[in-house]
Amino acid sequence: MKLDHLQWPQKGWGYLPATQEIFDALNEVKLEYNPSFVLEIGYLMGHSTTYMLETFDADIISISPEVDVGPAAIKAGDWISTEERISMYVKMKEIYGERWEWIRGRTQDLRSKLIHHYKDQFDMCFVDGNHSFKNAYYDVETCSMLEIPVILVDNMNTPDVSIAVQRQGDYILEKTFKYESTFKGKTTVIDLCVFELDK
């Protein structure tokens, strides 16, 4: 797996760790679903994007704003700059070319465009955007409106994300993977869950 291009900053929103637990989970998803066109909600610096591009025989479209931080994070310097993210985008485009694209913007701003261009085309979505209830609900609802049959949701142990997926109600839990992540000196066990669209 090509990982040399990735950076590992201990600031910002966090990212999927490069661990065997994650690679095993993605390989299991590949064996079960073999996705060929994936939507990723929540691109930061290309960690999960890279793992999926390396694991799946798939093209990926990632969506996220160039920067989405509050004043406290800016004051503390605890965020990834737009320049850093664009620099990583350039590196990843050199490696993956047309297999990957980053569309800049929030799900709320892009929903109509996504539905117009991509309804019923994605066969999987990796949902790892903003973890508030409102945003997680909107992300999963967008997946349903796009008729994406399988979603892989990170941070399902986070109450807002868990409640959002349950209340949205269009997806049925199929599998839970647990992985350990150490970020900013804190180790957490996180749930990464596979859901299928309830047709």
Image (tube, rainbow, N blue to C red):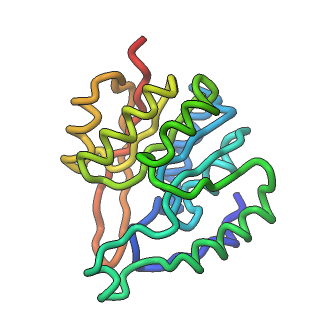
Question: x and y percent of residue 85 in the render?
Answer: 58, 72
Relative to 72, does residue 65 appear above or below in the rendering?
Answer: above
Residue ID at (26%, 46%): 134
Q: Quadrant of residue 94?
A: bottom right
Relative to 68, does residue 123 appear above or below in the rendering?
Answer: above
Q: Nearer the viewer, residue 147 or 152?
A: 147
Specify the farthest residue to the top: 199
Q: Quadrant of residue 13?
A: bottom left
Residue ID at (66%, 45%): 60
Question: x and y percent of residue 102 in the render?
Answer: 63, 55
Quadrant placement of the N terminus: bottom right
Residue ID at (42%, 11%): 199
Question: How many numbered marks appear?
Answer: 0
- Residue 165 falls left or right of residue 45: left
Residue ID at (56%, 58%): 104
Relative to 12, does residue 165 appear above or below in the rendering?
Answer: above
Q: Nearer the viewer, residue 168 or 156?
A: 168
Question: x and y percent of residue 77 in the render?
Answer: 37, 87
Q: Nearer the viewer, residue 8 or 41?
A: 41
Question: x and y percent of residue 128 in the render?
Answer: 42, 50
- Residue 76 falls left or right of residue 84: left
